[in-house]
Amino acid sequence: MKVRIIVLPLSYFSSYLFAQTQLDESLSSGVFTAQLATTTISQRFDNSQTPNNYATALGGQLKYETASFAGFSAAAAFYTSQDISFATGEVKKGEQNSELSSTKGNYTQLAETYLDYQYKDFNLRTGRQVFDSPFADSDPIRMVQNTFEATIASYTTQGLTCKAGQILNWQGYDASLENGFTPLGKNGAWFGSLAFANDSFDTSAWFYRVSEMANLFYIDAGVHLHVSDDVVLHGSGQYSNQQELGQSGVEAQIFGALGRVEFAAFTIDVAYNTIYSRKGKSSFSGFGGGALYTSMDTMILDNISTGHQSQALCATLSYDFKDLKLFYAFGEFSTNKNELGEKADIIEQNIGFEYNINNDFQLSAIYAKENDKIDSNTAQNNWDRAQINLIYRFKGKNG
């Protein structure tokens, strides 16, 4: 029997040791980030037997992300929200507001866990991740933002960005906190996009194929004019064509326009959207807050778009003074009469502020009020709600 002796060169061990050292440094040089938050919310209904509801929750996020090793990095993040019992209404009496922590009063999820690869201008990320696009976005308006199980590739060069990928599942406030990660359609959604931006112009085009729901095409464009050091003008337009797949009922055309004036510390926005949908069909704003210029804190045009031509007109005034931002928004959402003579006309108003106490603390609040101009006796669109958020963020390097 012959014994074969393999002699490895010293450079092999040197390379191995160097790679191992680099990997160890990548893990030990990772970064922890955390966000602690408390939110209180209450809603009061007008002229109805629906009980008022309220809740206060404590929670946040804890995330660890490794440093890059040969272009690769990884991350994981827990999200949690827990109702504070003495400051939350009773579920049995219908007094609990479930928007913060679900009807169970608690929610904990491994909301992010992904592998990331970066090579020059190319990026590939797969796993549970935060993603923002016209028809799938994080929408961080309550305690738990949306995240997606997806594989997404992107390439950016000289102001041009290309993205493509597949999204399978999602979780968060908009996905319902009752079920954790839930599917986007039967087989998820495929998407692709092309975007360009510079100081004076931006445009993007997106296509989504959501299985057994719809093909969604979206395009927008905006121009930005710096009149002086204190005055900037913006104008934008958007269009979406939505074609039904299966019997989902999603089929519509959406048009939108937005004008903005920034002068000194003030900003004025005026936005308009209109939706054309056939009998029994409606529009779809996506998985999250949606792309429409006219979306308010609660009201979106989708809610009244079925079988109507519907429109929304919104105006916002905001004032920024150092670390304080004040804002007021007014929106009217209405439809033309359908073949049965039915129509809708709903007003929503939002007023609030955001205050960055320092680099770590942020305090914000919003008061929203809805009124149905046609039927003031229903609970659905006749209410007011208040929400206060306090957030503390910090970052720490491992080791």
Image: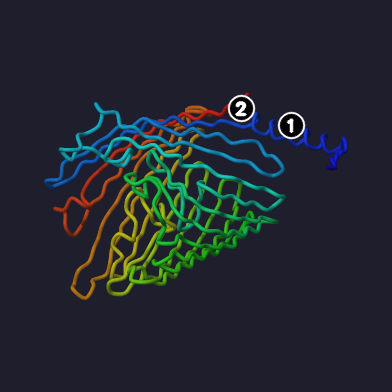
Total labels: the figure holds 2
Query: 226 or 354, which lies in front?
Result: 354
Residue at the extreme top: 399
Query: 388 or 311, which lies in front?
Result: 388
Residue at 30 percent of width and 44 percent of height: 368
Q: Position of residue 58 (x, y in %)?
A: 36, 30
Q: Is residue 68 left or right of residue 374?
A: right
> Mark 1 or 2 closer to N-term?
1
Q: Position of residue 64 (x, y in %)?
A: 55, 34
Q: For numbered disc 1, what is the local secondary structure?
A: helix
The residue pinned by badge 1 equals 21
Q: Which mark is nearer the camera, 1 or 2? A: 1
Q: Position of residue 380 (x, y in %)?
A: 21, 52
For marks 1 and 2, give the CA distance.
Answer: 18 Å
Residue at the extreme front: 1
The residue pinned by badge 2 equals 397
Return the mark for residue 128.
none
Q: For numbered disc 2, what is the local secondary structure?
A: strand
Q: Which amino acid type corresponds to the residue marked 1 in the rendered image?
A: Thr
**Above or below: residue 42 compared with residue 208:** above
Q: Is residue 8 left or right of residue 57?
A: right
**Above or below: residue 277 compared with residue 161:** below
Query: 312 or 307, which lies in front?
Result: 307
Q: Which amino acid type corresponds to the residue marked 2 in the rendered image?
A: Lys
Residue at 27 percent of width and 46 percent of height: 369
Q: Quadrant of residue 291?
A: bottom left
The quadrant in which the N terminus is found is top right
Q: Quadrant of residue 308?
A: bottom left
Residue at 25 percent of width and 32 percent of height: 88
Residue at 23 percent of width and 73 percent of height: 338
